[in-house]
Amino acid sequence: MARDVFTKENFDKLEKVILENKGKQGALMPVLTEAQRIFGCVSMEVQKKISEGLNIPLAEIYGVATFYSQFSLEPKGEYVIGVCLGTACYVKGAQEIIDKIAKKIDVEIGKTSADGKFTLVGTRCIGACGLAPVLTVNEDVYGKLVVSDVDGIVEKYL
């Protein structure tokens, strides 16, 4: 079962961050960044708390949260698997690798597994073209992959 990050304790942490930043010029970005760190996302519930606390319209907060790619509106898994779909990786088989991972962990691209363990995303170029195709699992980088490498990599995180 997915872990619950929307606890009273975490909302208390968010409230403290809001109070520390309230009234400061440019408070929204640091509050959103800290909310992302606390909850792993800036869900609508989190955005509403920020809106109320900073007295900023919800639409403005949503606009910022959806504009910047570092913010996620849904919780991510314990392990975020990113498969580079940049040109070099794509032409060397990245699509087959991402398809194999999706099947192995039973999750759609862009979604989180039912147990909350994995989020699978297709990424833009990560700047490791010489290692194409490349995937990351959180901060771990795997390169020069073939489809048969997928099982061993995923099993490290089960």
Image (cartoon, rainbow, N blue to C red):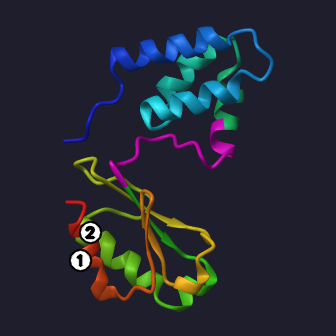
The answer to whether 18 is drawn above or below residue 73 in the figure is above
Is 56 included in the stretch rendered in magenta? no
Q: Dominant secondary structure of the magenta stretch?
A: loop
Residues in magenta, as a range: 65-79
Pinpoint residue 125: horizontal percent, then vertical percent: 62, 72
As drawn, the label of residue 154 is 2
**In the rendered image, which quarter contains the N terminus?**
top left
Pinpoint residue 136: horizontal percent, then vertical percent: 44, 66
Circle 1: element type = helix
Q: Is 41 or 24 nearer to us in this picture?
A: 24
The answer to whether 21 is drawn above or below residue 149 in the figure is above
Residue plotted at (69% across, 36% down) = 64
**In the rendered image, which quarter contains the C terminus?**
bottom left
Residue plotted at (33% across, 20% down) = 7
Circle 2: element type = helix
Residue plotted at (58% across, 77% down) = 128
Residues packed near mark 2 inside 10 Å, few (<14), some (14 to 19) or many (20 plus):
some
The residue type indicated by label 1 comes to Asp
**Residues at discs 2 and 1 in contact (Cβ within 8 Å):** yes
